[in-house]
Image (cartoon, rainbow, N blue to C red):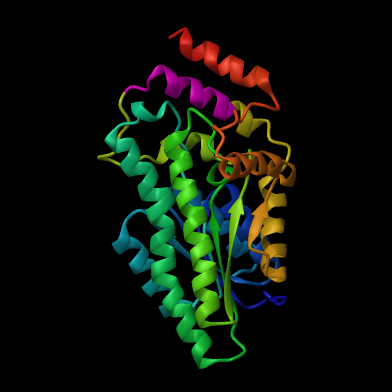
Amino acid sequence: MISDFKGKTAVLTGAGSGFGLECARLGARLGMNLVLADVQQDALDKAAAEMTAAGAQVLAFRLDVSKAAEVEALGAAVFARFGAPHFVFNNAGVGAGGLIWENTLKDWEWVIGVNLMGVAHGVRVFTPMMLDAARKDPAWQGHIVNTASMAGLLNAPNMGIYNVSKHAVVSMSETLYQDLALVTDQISASVLCPFFVPTGISQSHRNRPDGLEAVKPTRSQLIGQAMSDKAVGSGKVTAAEVAQKVFDAIAANQFYVYSHPKAIGSVQTRLEDILQARNPTSPFAHKPELGEELKKALREA
């Protein structure tokens, strides 16, 4: 159980917006040292200025989490400035939609690079550092939080590439939790599975890197983008509320963190499909009009 955050160091990827930014704000209020990493320089500068003004010790680092060497450089910079971090929030993520066969190779490389390999690099770089700190000090405690999504527990149509990446993050996080439990009682892990929350996720394409540019979007991708914009924009739970849930989960050593606990009913239905070997239930079973709207839009193409 971790109750004292003051003076502890947190590394946050995707710190310029959304959950990363709100977790950083909470960390600043709790008196933490903050390592802010983001691919978007202007958002990073703004976040760093805000946290510094709030009294936090800040290390700002521009970073593309999909690049192994850049995450390794981040690790070295963190260790040089603050030592091993107590908390790592592998939070950076991008969204992409469309029918799964319409995703280009570049779409796959971009989304898997950020959503999956970005988390893998964070786990690979920081966990050994944290374990070493724990071995040297029996009182040292740490926690790793990986941001997945309810799309890591469900498979809504027309957003397959995102689903695939987030299912992999849930799997990696569950394995990390079990692996850590084998070797230490001082460090644990959580997975954050938000549903639709107003963040910058639906506008991820703004940070798509050179070399992985999108081709002209297909009809299904435009429809997916519009539905995502609407769902994310109308979310009732705020990113700040989710950040508080994350810190509460760390304090309670709670693994699964949900922004919308009621949405878990759909996960139960999916698991029952698996247990009973029945064909997948429509994820729109509770809101059939949404499914009909999507089907109509796609079949009109």
Q: Quadrant of residue 281?
A: top right
* Prevalent SS, magenta region: helix
Q: For the point 52% across and 35% down, which residue is it?
A: 202
Residue at point 49% right, 20% down?
A: 223
Using residue 35 as the reference point, say whether residue 198 is left or right of it: right
Q: Nearer the viewer, residue 16 or 190?
A: 190
Decide: is 247 above or below 97.
below
Q: Quadrant of the C terminus?
A: top left
Q: Position of residue 77 (x, y in %)?
A: 39, 72
- In the rendered view, tell whether residue 122 sits above or below residue 202: below
Q: What residue appears at the point 30 percent right and 34 percent down from the top-left corner?
A: 213
Q: Position of residue 192 (x, y in %)?
A: 60, 54
157 falls in the magenta region: no
What residue span does the magenta drawing correspond to?
A: 216-229
Residue 198, how many percent across, how many down?
63, 39
Q: Position of residue 196 (x, y in %)?
A: 63, 38
Indicate left or right for 203 with 4 as reference. Answer: left
Residue 226 appears left or right of 268: left
In the picture as drawn, the residue positioned furthest to the left comes out as: 211
What residue is at 46 percent from the left and 39 percent from the top?
A: 162
Closer to the camera, 109 or 215?
Answer: 109
Residue 128 visible in the snapshot: yes
